[in-house]
Amino acid sequence: MKENIALIGFMGSGKTTIGRHLAKELEMKFIDTDKMISMHEKKTISEIFQEHGERYFRDLERKIIAEESRENNIVISTGGGAIVDNENIKNLKKTSFVVYLDSSLECIHERVKNGKNRPLLNEVIDLFATIKELHEKRDWLYRVSSDFFVKIDVNSNIHDTVNLIKEAYIKS
């Protein structure tokens, strides 16, 4: 069994919420890479994107994932685009049981439609179409990068999801 659990998936899939519950259930430390980046930069993710661009953000993300994946007994919630960088996946797979939270497009749309903290979705004309297009580009990366996946939709129960991940992790 690997020492850590890493949650990957599209923005709004529930990585942070599920990660917190999972870490508590397994008595592990919880790390949210987006929150760590925000704290380090003393800015929101949107401000980082706006002021420095996506490449700068991805560089910070890569450093955080490299550092945190060396730790033990943690649940790591990654940013939705972390899988675009092969280094992130290599680092996570070394020590982490990687779980893809495979959220339905409808669920993602419902969760992000009123938020302004998603820089890749800010100021788009058709939010659902943008989500669908970006999700289609990333879905295969999530799938090939994961050891396990859980389907998430608007009716998913957080406790059931946490239990599924917990059981798969223990059996791994």
Image: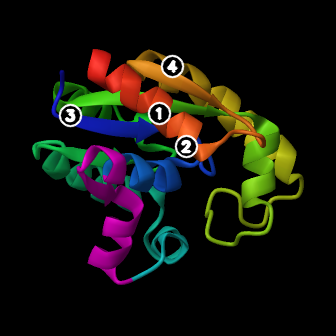
Distance from label 3 to label 1 (Cα)? 25 Å
Out of 107 and 54, give the one closest to the viewer.
107
Q: Which residue is mark 2?
A: 159
x, y percentage for residue 37?
33, 67
Q: Are marks 4 and 1 in contact (CB under 8 Å)?
A: no
Of tags 2 and 4, the one toward the viewer is: 2
What distance separates the C-alpha of mark 4 from that of mark 1? 20 Å
Residue 54 at what x, y percent from top left?
Answer: 47, 58
- Residue 148, image x, y percentages: 44, 20
Chain-order first, disc 4 or disc 1: 4
Residue that badge 4 annotates:
143
Q: Quadrant of the N terminus?
A: top left
Q: Considering the numbered disc 4 on the image, is that residue within a helix, a strand or a loop?
A: helix
**Type of secondary structure dominating the magenta stretch:** helix
Quadrant position of residue 134: top right
Q: Which residues are magenta?
A: 24-42
Q: Is residue 117 above or below residue 10?
A: below
